[in-house]
Image (spheres, rainbow, N blue to C red):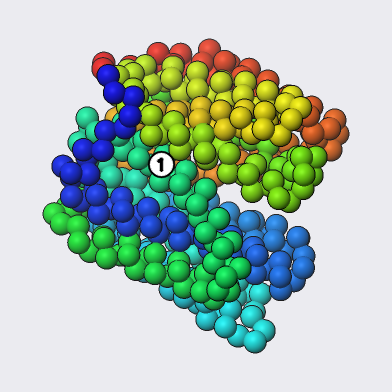
Amino acid sequence: MSYFINLSLFRRNRNFTLLYIGQFVSFLGTMITSVALPYQIYTETHSTLMVGLLSLVQLLPLLITALIGGVFADKYHRRLLLLAAESILATGSLLLAINACLPQPHIWILFVVSSLMSAFNGLHRPALESIVQQIVPKEDFATVSSLASIKGSVGMIGGPAIGGLIIASFGIVTTYLVDVISFAISLTALLLMTHIPKPPVISDDSTLESLKQGFRYAFSRQQLIGTYVVDFIAMIFGMPTALFPAIAASFGGAKVLGILYSMPAVGALIVSFLSGWTKQVKRHGLAIAVAAALWGVAIIFFGLASNFWGAMFFLALAGAFDGISGIFRMTMWNETIPNHLRGRLAGIEMISYLSGPRLGDTEAGLVAAAFGITASIVSGGVLCVVGVAAACVLLPKFWQYRSDR
């Protein structure tokens, strides 16, 4: 049994290779812009409140379009949806670059364009998730999940670092133009893909009825509900990113803040490269639950750590367990969800993993304000473990799920 990820999928599947390379590059560009936008808003306004409002205006439209995008992905040609969404996203980045060229850039343009780009990202993601299931055979789903984890981890580590370097060396306009180029590469890769059929439409229902069908399917499957609930619990109670600036202050200030944000992704990246063993695991629900509980345990030790590098070790370990959980979640989704429903369920998944971290930031901040930073982190880790255990008791079909049945 090999512990390293099997990369033969790239040799065997041209469409997946093109899709993966294009999305890898465009995700890096997106992460670069995710640094440039708040940086520009802060330098123009010197207001942390305005930076905070940016996250809000990006989240709200996404919660709506993610569901609509799921319906579209199950009704229309997924590659055409990706081409349309990425063309508009590229246009948005170009508008940001043009606005940045002005002697006095307009703040309202930053908010409006970033909100629209976030909305179209909600249309993009379900089409991407469902087209992957369409072009990759079932036996490669575990590998696809590991590769998705690598893409996400590299993007979250490298994107902000590259973005900071470009801003410092070439300015904000060039930074946005790099994102435009990344979308151009992704669009080229999509155009080079061949023989991607339109998904079969089982019935010609309205958008609302199609959404209801997706929710009915999700809530009728304990194993799916378990993946959503366990991840939601882990993110609410065990994701103390809102406390990172305060934690950084106790370990040396701003110079270590970037390390704090990147360490979970470092752990996830390492475990993704060493994920060959995951193809041998059949108890995917149990694997998700154990990994999520161990995430909580690692967060407890992170909160109790007395020195910086000890804290970083446990934070990276937490990220590794989150990476394992993510690999098995994606594998279970692709194995159990019919392709004609995959887009709608991908939209529901987006709602789950987008809202959890933001609610987690609120929870961590409130508890820290009342009882202190250490108490907030440790109690969150404990509640994560308890919550995962409760989910397994209440959803027995989730942790009993086997992929070979």
Q: Residue at x 37, y 28 (%)?
A: 275
Q: Is residue 24 left or right of residue 171?
A: left
Q: Is residue 103 above or below residue 20?
A: below
x, y (%) of residue 83?
31, 64
Q: Residue at x 31, y 32 (%)?
A: 5
Can residue 99 be seen by looking at this rendering? Answer: yes
Q: Which residue is mark 1?
A: 150
Furthest residue to the right?
Answer: 370
Kind of element beneath mark 1: helix
- Quarter of image, res 329: top left
Q: Report the quarter where the C terminus lies.
A: top left
Q: Residues within 10 Å of mark 1 (few under 14, many from 20)?
A: many
Furthest residue to the bottom?
Answer: 103
Can residue 68 be seen by looking at this rendering? Answer: no
Q: Is residue 381 above or below residue 103?
A: above
- Quarter of image, res 181: bottom left
Q: Residue at x 69, y 46 (%)?
A: 256
x, y (%) of residue 88?
41, 69
x, y (%) of residue 174?
51, 74
x, y (%) of residue 208?
41, 49
In depth, the one of 54 and 251 nearer the eye is 251
Q: Residue at x 32, y 57 (%)?
A: 22
Q: Is residue 339 above or below residue 21?
A: above
Q: Report the quarter where the N terminus lies.
A: top left
- Quarter of image, res 160: bottom right
Q: Is residue 86 left or right of residue 112?
A: left
Disc 1 residue type (three-letter): Ile
In depth, the one of 95 and 155 nearer the eye is 155
